[in-house]
Image (cartoon, helix red, strand yellow):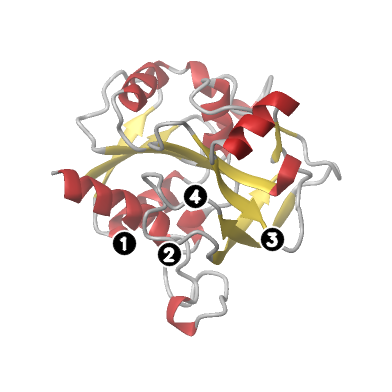
C-alpha cells in the first residue's frame, strides 16, 4: 500500500507522518502542495504544521492549494484521507469535514500528552480500536478549539460522527470535548492530536498498557492499511 503525505509551505510534521506510515507497513509517498498529481496513492495524510504561516485562518490558504482539488476528488471516491492538526483545519476549510477550529479558549499554545476516548471505531482510520478505548497521544496546537452550530453539533452527535473525544481535561475549549470527527462515509477523519508522534515503543507517551506504551497512534495508520488490504 502507498500512502501519500502532502507537504505545504510551513508543514512541520510531514516527515514524522511519513515515518509513521513506514512503521505501519506501507510505503510513504511525498506529495507537493503545488502539484495536481496524487501519484496513484491508496490513502492520503495531511500533516500538522503551520501552512502558509497560518495567515487568514489556519488551513484556509492550504485548502486552496492545487493538490487539494485532487484530495477532494479522491475523498469523494472513497480514498481514506487523514488530517492531523493543521491537516484537520484544512479539511474543515475545504468542506470535507464539518465545523471549524478556532484559537484555544485560554489563548495559549498548548503541548502535552493527551488522553482521548475512541467514540467511533468504524471509520477507515479507527477499525483497530474499540469504542470506549482510551489512548494517549501528543497534542500541540494554538487554534484547536472545535466549533460548530448547535444544529450541526447535534447532527454530529446523533449520527455518530465524533471519532475522538478529550478525556480528563479539555485542553482548548472544543465544544463537547471533541478531538476528532469524520465525514458521513467514514473515509475522511480529522483530529487535533498527533498520532504520528506515538508509533514507537519508548518514544511516545506512557499508557496504562505496557504492551502498547508509546504506540497508541500506530493503530490509526494500521487501521487504514488493514482496510485497504481487505479491499485489494
On screen, residue 66 versus residue 146, left or right, reads left
Mark drawn on residue 167? 3
Residue at disc 2, secondary structure: loop
Between 57 and 163, which is closer to the camera in this rendering? 163
Q: Residue at x 50, y 29 (%)?
A: 9
Q: Are marks 4 and 2 in contact (CB under 8 Å)?
A: no
What residue would you read off at disc 2? 199
- Mark 3 vs 2, N-terminal side: 3
- Mark 1 vs 4, N-terminal side: 1
What residue would you read off at disc 4? 120
Q: Are marks 4 and 3 in contact (CB under 8 Å)?
A: no
The residue mark sitting in front, 4 or 2, is: 4
- Mark 4 vs 2, N-terminal side: 4
Q: Residue at x 54, y 41 (%)?
A: 160
The residue mark sitting in front, 3 or 2, is: 3
- Marks 1/4: CA–CA distance: 24 Å
The residue mark sitting in front, 3 or 1, is: 3
- Mark 4 vs 3, N-terminal side: 4
- Mark 2 vs 1, N-terminal side: 1
For disc 3, the neighbor class at 10 Å (few under 14, some 14 to 19, many from 20) is some
- Measuring from the top left, give residue 100's x and y in whole percent: 65, 28
Q: Quadrant of the C terminus?
A: top left
Q: Are marks 2 and 1 in contact (CB under 8 Å)?
A: yes
- Marks 3/2: CA–CA distance: 20 Å
Q: Residue furthest left?
A: 232
- Mark 3 vs 1, N-terminal side: 1
- Measuring from the top left, give residue 154's x and y in whole percent: 67, 32
Mark drawn on residue 213? none
What residue would you read off at disc 1? 23
Amino acid at each position: 500500500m502507498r500512502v501519500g503525505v502532502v507537504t505545504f509551505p510551513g508543514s512541520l510534521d510531514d516527515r514524522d507522518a511519513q515515518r509513521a506510515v513506514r512503521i505501519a507497513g506501507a510505503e510513504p509517498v511525498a506529495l507537493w502542495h503545488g502539484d495536481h498529481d496524487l501519484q496513484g496513492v491508496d490513502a492520503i495524510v495531511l500533516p500538522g504544521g503551520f501552512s502558509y504561516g497560518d495567515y487568514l485562518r489556519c488551513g484556509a490558504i492550504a485548502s486552496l492549494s492545487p493538490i487539494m482539488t485532487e484530495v477532494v476528488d479522491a475523498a469523494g471516491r472513497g480514498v481514506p484521507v487523514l488530517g492531523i492538526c493543521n491537516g484537520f483545519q484544512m479539511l474543515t476549510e475545504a468542506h470535507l469535514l464539518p465545523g471549524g477550529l478556532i484559537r484555544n479558549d485560554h489563548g495559549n499554545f498548548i503541548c502535552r500528552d493527551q488522553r482521548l476516548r475512541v467514540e467511533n471505531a468504524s471509520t477507515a482510520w479507527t477499525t483497530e480500536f474499540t469504542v470506549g478505548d482510551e489512548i494517549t497521544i501528543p497534542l500541540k496546537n494554538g487554534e484547536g478549539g472545535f466549533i460548530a452550530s448547535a444544529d450541526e453539533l447535534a447532527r454530529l452527535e446523533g449520527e455518530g460522527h465524533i471519532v475522538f473525544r478529550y478525556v480528563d481535561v479539555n485542553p482548548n475549549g472544543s465544544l463537547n470535548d471533541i478531538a476528532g470527527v469524520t465525514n458521513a462515509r467514514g473515509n475522511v477523519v480529522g483530529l487535533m492530536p498527533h498520532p504520528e508522534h506515538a508509533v514507537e515503543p519508548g518514544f511516545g507517551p506512557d499508557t496504562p498498557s505496557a504492551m502498547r506504551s508509546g504506540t497508541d497512534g500506530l493503530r490509526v495508520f494500521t487501521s487504514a492499511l488493514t482496510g485497504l488490504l481487505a479491499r485489494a
